[in-house]
Amino acid sequence: MGLMEILLIIIPSTLLWAAPLIFTGLGGNFSESSGVVNIGLEGLMVIGAFTAIVFNLTFVDIFGSMTPWVALLAAMVVGALLSILHAVASITFRADQVVSGVAINLLAIGAALFLVKFIYGKGQTDIIQKGFSKVDIPFLSDIPVIGKLFFSNTYYTSFVAIAVAFLAWFVMFKTPFGLRLRAVGEHPMAADTMGINVTRMRYIGVLISGALAGIGGGVYAQSISSDFGHATISGQGFMALAALIFGKWHPLGVMGAALFFGFAQSLSIIGSSLPFLENIPNVYLLIAPYVLTILALTGFIGRADAPKASGTPYIKGKR
Amino acid sequence: MSNRMKNIVVPLVAVLLGVLVGTIIMIATGYNAGSAFIALWNGAFGEIYYTGEVIRQVTPYILAGLAVAFAFRTGLFNIGVEGQLIVGWLAAVWVGVAFELPKFIHLPLAVLAAAAAGALWAFIPGLLKAKFKVHEVIVTIMMNYVALHVTNYIIRTVLSEKSDRSEMIAESASLRSPFLEGLTDYSRLHWGILIALACVFIMWFLLEKTSKGYELRAVGFNQHASEYAGMSVSRNIILSMVISGAFAGLAGAMEALGTFGYAAIKGGFTGVGFDGIAVALLGGNGPIGIIFAALLFGSLKVGALNMPLEAGVPNELVDIIIALIVFFVAASYMIRIFIDRISKKGVK
């Protein structure tokens, strides 16, 4: 098997697995930069996956081939709605943000499975007819070598995800809104003194995280799993959290980390068909994202520091 | 209202709110809430068999709750109970199948192996927290997944020959009890509940009655003050995580040596570790509270299995209720304000 053939398998597969992680990781970035830890990403992805699948199954006759995209919008809205709970608890009611996130995770999987049984009378949905499918991207796939490697036999969602990462970088680092968001996460009291509404900025941060994690779940469900059951999302949200840390709370870093984790995930699945990997137990690839994240936090791979006020509620007038 | 009273009333209100919202969900989706709760009750206490199953479920819940609570009391958040439980489970099964020893050596050895494995798994985040100031929440989450994949790998390669589960453990390492099973109409109730209750006592004694426990709590309250008083902050952080992990490992031993008797490949987490967070929170991180909270969640979980059969309601409703209880306890600021308002009116 030549290098070209191996790359032709690995690159599209990496892009496929990375897309949900990029969306969700970016979501986490908005929340954490505003100072709210969001362990609930997993649950938000679950609810996004659930919404996308149910919407897709229900409305496929109306929207036709546009169904997956419209379903993504629905997943985005429902993800944002669920994240309001996290925002209310952790910002307004000063709950422990980690605990509130855990509650979101428990709630999302419970509610989604309850509703699946309520709607379909069984524990798992049917398989969707119109998911995201492999395409050759027009024009770009005609570029020699690069076109064949990156732009053929791939998914639009992966490129949307990468575009959103650049957009998120622009918003966070090049706009007044982004500056305020980060200020609120680094030093809320100083931001408050300068007339920034800390509570409102944090609510926006959490809502964006819910929306993006919802999209992430929707992308995963409609391009990888194609149905929804109890194990559809199993750890993707936490892996996105890992990407957020490994990417050092920077949108482009998050994108890079998510691509790398997508690479590791896809290798753990297709590795057995590749010549140089068939003898390596795939457990190493499975745990790589988590181990690397721990190493990154420890400082062995460049120290990763969270936004300073991340995890602490802001109480006006308290020193 | 005194603080002590409030600490009892707040969890109760949270439970009531959780049940209330659960009821509203059932009404909104057209299920019969009344028969659902009757089915829930019958599924937990309707027959002695079910009650035996409840106590069996309560056993790992108590230990997982202790693990979370012990860390909480010493200023740490151990969200990695799930991973420590899984490695404890694996270690107990490993000792259970690998040796042939008399029961009075084999069983304690298997239990201790589980505790040691859990402790070791928690030692890593403790060490990283103490030496590198890495937040334990993230590390323990990552360690959960490492535990999941590594134990699956070991089960597949070491404990079996590419099969999905290990052999059954030797009888001499089992916590199973024909006596308790006979008493409860052949439920899977086992001796583990005694270990769990003993651990409740150990935690209380350690934290409240020894100077080491005082140190651990002091470091949790205020690192700088403790350091000034001559305590080693980093050693106490590591010790606290290790003890917490040992409790979690014991919870795994309960599943390994009592309930199942083998270890199988897992596609996802058992959920016991995360429910342990709920148990510890609702129980206010105290010994008595943990027992009651474990009892509540244990009976909810076991009773829920009867809801689809008797009332046609999906058992996930109980998961929703548990999540809501966690949520309301977490947001107890809201409940506390509400109680303050009401009790002030009473004074006037």
Image (tube, coloured by chain):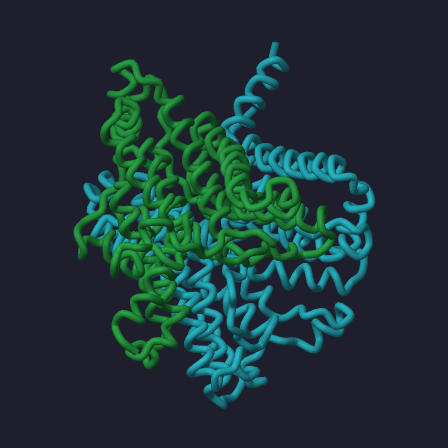
Chain colours: A green, B cyan
Left or right? Give the position of A309 relative to A59. Answer: left
Q: Measured along the vertical axis of the image, is residue B41 above or below residue B325?
A: below
* Count of marks overlaid on the render: 0
Residue A201 quadrant: top left
The residue shown at (42%, 63%) is B246
Residue in front for this viewpoint, A220 or B289: A220
Residue A156, image x and y in percent? 41, 48
Residue in front for this viewpoint, B199 or A31: A31
User: Is residue A258 in sight in this rendering?
Assistant: yes
The residue shown at (60%, 54%) is A129
Left or right? Give the position of A107 relative to B285. Answer: right
Left or right? Give the position of A295 relative to B331. Answer: left
Residue A228 quadrant: bottom right
Which quarter of the figure is the C terminus of chain A placed in? top left
The residue shown at (49%, 78%) is B93
Residue B12, image x and y in percent? 62, 36
* Residue at the extreme bottom of the image, as rendered: B100
Residue A65, image x and y in percent? 55, 46
Residue A310, image x and y in percent? 32, 36
Residue in front for this viewpoint, A288 or A275: A275
The residue shown at (77%, 45%) is B37
Residue in front for this viewpoint, A84 or B132: A84
Which quarter of the figure is the N terminus of chain A placed in? bottom left
Q: Measured along the vertical axis of the image, is residue A92 above or below residue A80?
A: above
User: Is residue B296 in sight in this rendering?
Assistant: no
Residue A107 quadrant: top right
